[in-house]
Amino acid sequence: MDFIKLELEKVKNADKLDGNPSSLIESIKSFLCYIKGEETGADALKERVSPPVAQHYYLPPSSSGPAGNRKAYEAVIFFEDGCEMENIRAFAIIHHLKELTEDFHHTPEDIIDDADSVQAIREKGFTILLRTDRSYRELYDFFTGAAFVTNLELRELTDDQMSEASVPRMTAMQESPIKIPVVQSQEQVDHGQAESRSSHQNIISVDVGKLDKLMDLMGEMVIAEAMVTQNPELKTMQLNSFYKAARQLRKITGEMQDMIMSVRMVPLSASFHKMHRIVRDMSRKLGKEVELILVGEGTEVDKNIIEHISDPLMHLVRNAVDHGIEAPDARAAAGKPPTGQITLEAKNAGSDVLIIVRDDGGGIHKDKILQKAIEHGLINKPADELTDKEIYNLLFMPGFSTNDQVTEFSGRGVGMDVVTKNLEAIGGSVSIDSAEGIGTVTTLKIPLTLAIIDGMNIRVGKAKYTLPTTSIRETFQAKASDLIQDPEGNEMIMVRGKCYPVLRLHEQFAVRADTTDLTKGIMLMIEQDDKCLSLFADELLGQHQVVVKALPSYMKNIRRVEGLAGCTLLGDGSVSLILNIGGLLSA
């Protein structure tokens, strides 16, 4: 693939096509001979005779797993006219189908060595009978996602239909060694196509640009609904029937929003599967044996989130292979298997998605991190007072690296701060936990969507701010007896025996507040990744759904902007700045 991509780039740039694929072709041929147990070399490929192989076509109702969860399907796949090498494209589908199920049979059978299989696929399609616990939609997405697939007939079969479709093939093979193609009657063909059309009529492809426009319109509808139902002119009027209709409008608007959100959701599988290449290449170059395990790759997030997590994921996986997994001899000395494991897992957690990168390597050496941090002057208090979590968080400092030598993969000053910056841009966060000699776990916490959030609106003087409600632990009014100062003069508040720092929003954003007395305003306890902070504001305005808009580009270099995640338009037409919780906690 690398060779072909390089040659294509030469074509695009009108460069000379000087690549020589001869050695690559011979290497592939030799490898094919090797995995088939044949003699290596081109001559052996020309003269070899395929050994007789017992054919098995009958797919029992419960060959693996409970029968109730495994359904039977028949898929007939047609490729685009002129795409060529239909047998190779069919082989690629079968290769990836093994990730979904092992119980399948395909026609034509010999799609690699039989030259007639190409013409058979062009005329009759590539037919697959299978049993799996996957849903119809998952199978449909799998087959239609293959390259050059132009038409798919997919239908669910009963056990009787599966037996009728599979048993005769086995019987025919037992009676004669000649491969007999299965030909359906015209009645069966028409019935299958009719079923296919009835099953597929509710599935269409939609341009991504239209979905983005639909999401923008949905956001404008939320704003318009708020402007109508929260109009200040209505506060002094008794309009019972209006408020009843407004509640119904709000209900319908919420349901529409949820539906549009679900349409924009895409699985993380594409981003996860890219990591196989990274692990394979790095392990080969570093002389390590590493196995990548994917869990929950079907977890879905908004398509815009995917674009922001590709780089953090790649960096964390590279870091796990380079720094986490030990060399085979070192693992053997530690009593571990020579092959290290990296697990990439995704799962839902309320309105967030957790992506966990776990390795069974040597763990993080705290002493080495502390030494480097001291050398670079990154610690502002005695080392013995730092908790394990605070030590691990030093890895997120810009330019921090534990490698003394610059290599292809590390030591270049591109540290974990790349991960934190990308995640904070979408309102996410990252945390690390580790045990020396056992392994490291890095957890990314990302929101399901960026477009519309549930927010708490607050007021500081004439300025208005919005916080994600998921980040608010509690709101309360402070008592004078609970307010203290630390030795450095920083304001703190005592809540149920624990001390938390206080951040005055009017000082953070340089605005004039109605009151500076901490006992007269409102306190909001915010929390993220076990970090807590008490925000001081003038007033709570209420909880509403808000549409997140990006800050204009000219604000990117303004001081204090790290505490802001965007802005939104409120029902009265005023602008509210959306607070970046991660930025405030690290300020």
Image (cartoon, rainbow, N blue to C red):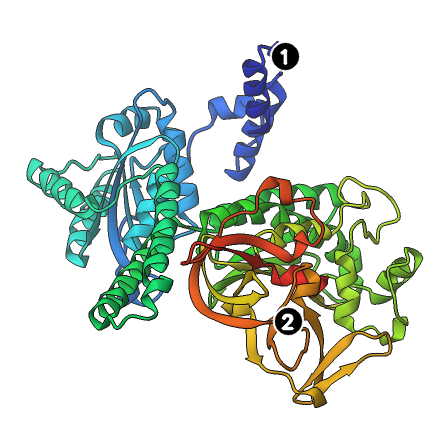
Quadrant where the image shows the C terminus: bottom right
> Residue 555, relative to residue 351: is it above or below?
above
Q: Amino acid at mark 2?
A: Leu
Residue at screen point 30% across, 46% down = 140
Q: How far across and how far down the image is residue 430, in percent?
A: 64, 60
Q: Residues within 10 Å of mark 2 (few under 14, many from 20)?
A: some
Quarter-of-image position of residue 331: bottom right
> Residue 225, relative to residue 120: is it above or below?
below
Residue at screen point 22% across, 30% down = 124
Q: How far is disc 1 from disc 2 in space, using C-alphas?
A: 64 Å
Residue at screen point 16% across, 36% down = 183
- Residue topped by disc 1: 18
- Residue topped by disc 2: 535
Q: How far across and how far down the image is residue 170, in percent?
A: 24, 47
Q: Are marks 1 and 2 in contact (CB under 8 Å)?
A: no
Report if residue 360 is visible in the image: no
Quarter-of-image position of residue 546: bottom left
Give the side of residue 55 with respect to residue 431, left or right.
left
> Residue 442, relative to residue 488: is it above or below?
above
